[in-house]
Image: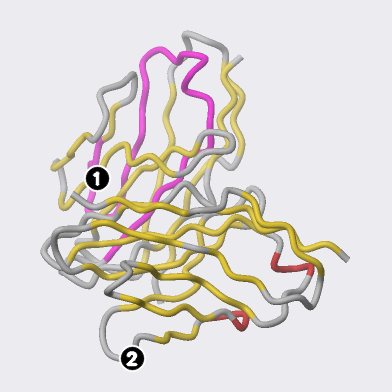
Amino acid sequence: SQTIHQWPATLVQPVGSPLSLECTVEGTSNPNLYWYRQAAGRGLQLLFYSVGIGQISSEVPQNLSASRPQDRQFILSSKKLLLSDSGFYLCAWAHGGRRNIQYFGAGTRLSVL
Amino acid sequence: AQSVTQLDSQVPVFEEAPVELRCNYSSSVSVYLFWYVQYPNQGLQLLLKYLSGSTLVKGINGFEAEFNKSQTSFHLRKPSVHISDTAEYFCAVSPYNNNDMRFGAGTRLTVKP
């Protein structure tokens, strides 16, 4: 069966520091991968998605970037965090193809102070 | 483009009462429809999905939803809720012709004793 791992679960970072959140998927190959942000009391905002190694699409211009160095690894980064980057970050994967259902990781709670 | 509207941001109900969480969508193409549940500080878990066939779909934890194409709705129902159903619920749509998925803003269901 497929599993998705996301870490760390909680992160407190000062403003201006770098960020690296990692997401890995097991039990499948060539998945579609997604990064979402969920601000307090709000819905999900799609940040990035990837359909293959090195292929990243950005939905919203911002202080963040994403990379996919391996087939089942998706990394969310920032060189300098802003206060507004605080939130709950969720990674998700889906089978390629039309009837994709997205499966989510447990999320990372990021607090930028 | 697709959009999803969850008509109620918060729904308080008493234990063992029935509940309906409303979802309307807008799309120029045919879509698949989903409901996800999010417990506090966790990722999203798929509750149920409509891909094709019967418009009444049953999911986990006793929930069901009905797809109404003419009203572009996909309301979620449960005849008798439990305290453990307290969570955030997200409606989502994904068009037939690509891997995109759009989420509603969420409905916070609070079940009171």
Colour pattern: secondary structure
Q: Which residue is mark 1?
A: A49
Marks 1 and 2 close (CB-CB < 8 Å): no
Image side of residue A27 versus residue B86, left or right: left
Seen in the picture, residue B3 relative to A108 is either above or below; the reply is below
Rendered residue at 40%/47% (across/down): A23
Q: Chain of mark 2?
A: B
Instruction: Report the amino acid beneath label 1.
Output: Tyr
Dot 2 alpha-carbon crowd within 10 angstroms: few under 14, some 14 to 19, many 20 or more: few
Please give the residue where the numbered disc 2 appears in the rendered image: B54
The quarter of the displayed image where residue A27 is located? bottom left
Nearest the eye: B78 or A69: B78
Looking at the rendered image, the disc whose residue lies closer to the viewer, 1 or 2, is 2
Q: Chain of mark 1?
A: A
Kindly state the secondary structure of the residue where label 2 is placed.
loop
Question: What's the magenta region?
Answer: A67-94
Most foreground residue, A50 or B96: B96
Query: What is the residue that sits farthest to the left in this orientation?
Result: B97
